[in-house]
Image (tube, rainbow, N blue to C red):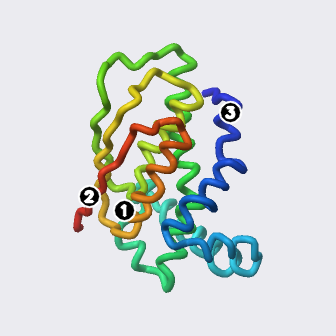
Amino acid sequence: MKVPISLSEAFGPEYEKLITDSFAPDAGLQEEIESLNSNRYVMRSIVPHIQKLSQTFQQPTRSSQPPPSLWKMSSNPKNLRLSYFLYFFPSNIFRYASIIAELSRLGYQWPHKGPINAIEFGSGLAEGACGIATGEKHGSIGLPQEASWSNVASDKTLLKWASFWNPEYFRFTNRENWQTRNFHKKN
């Protein structure tokens, strides 16, 4: 698989600026994001959560998505979610985007007319929709400019974050007319 250079650089300074200037203030995470400049904060509040998530995801029976109960297994669920958002979320977006970019490289073109109406289960932050938007930005297959994603997840906080993140991210990827509708599903 080959990815465009622009996709390999998609999570650099502009992406970070989107997090610090748009998402973090709206989601009430400005203080945490500013704390990322402190090695002490990162080592004590972010890295242990990344390690915990990595161990959970490496278990053979687990999917790449955290189980809903995982968010409750931390003394600081906010930092656990933030760790997921900062570390795992971009790589998951990249995986989706790489598929779209590869399809583009191979000459595939989306055959359907009209808007996309799709359901995304369990990601909370609509990783699939964000990844597809990223792929379309860096290797278009001709997806429509309009899309409605039903984002179904069990974690209310991630759904709340998605309501701030998704509109900003879709604008960032030139998909202004893409939207998510968030639905909470109890387990």
For the N terminus, the image quarter is top right
> Is residue 69 shown left or right of residue 29?
left
Mark 1 lies on residue:
159
Three-letter code, disc 2 = Phe
Q: Where is residue 180 in the image (x, y as percent from the top left)?
A: 35, 48
Give the structural element (helix, strand or loop) at label 1.
helix
Identified at 40% across, 37% down, the residue is: 177
Which numbered marker is on residue 183?
A: 2
> Is residue 96 shown left or right of residue 16?
left
- Furthest-bottom residue in this view: 75
Mark 3 lies on residue:
6
Q: CA–CA distance between discs 1 and 3?
A: 29 Å
- Furthest-left residue in this view: 186
Estimate how packed mark 1 is, as few (under 14), some (14 to 19) or many (20 or more) residues with alpha carbons within 10 Å: many
Viewer-nearest residue: 92 or 60: 92
> Is residue 15 shown left or right of residue 82?
right
Residue 184 in which image quadrant: bottom left
Q: Are discs 1 and 3 less than 8 Å apart at CB?
A: no
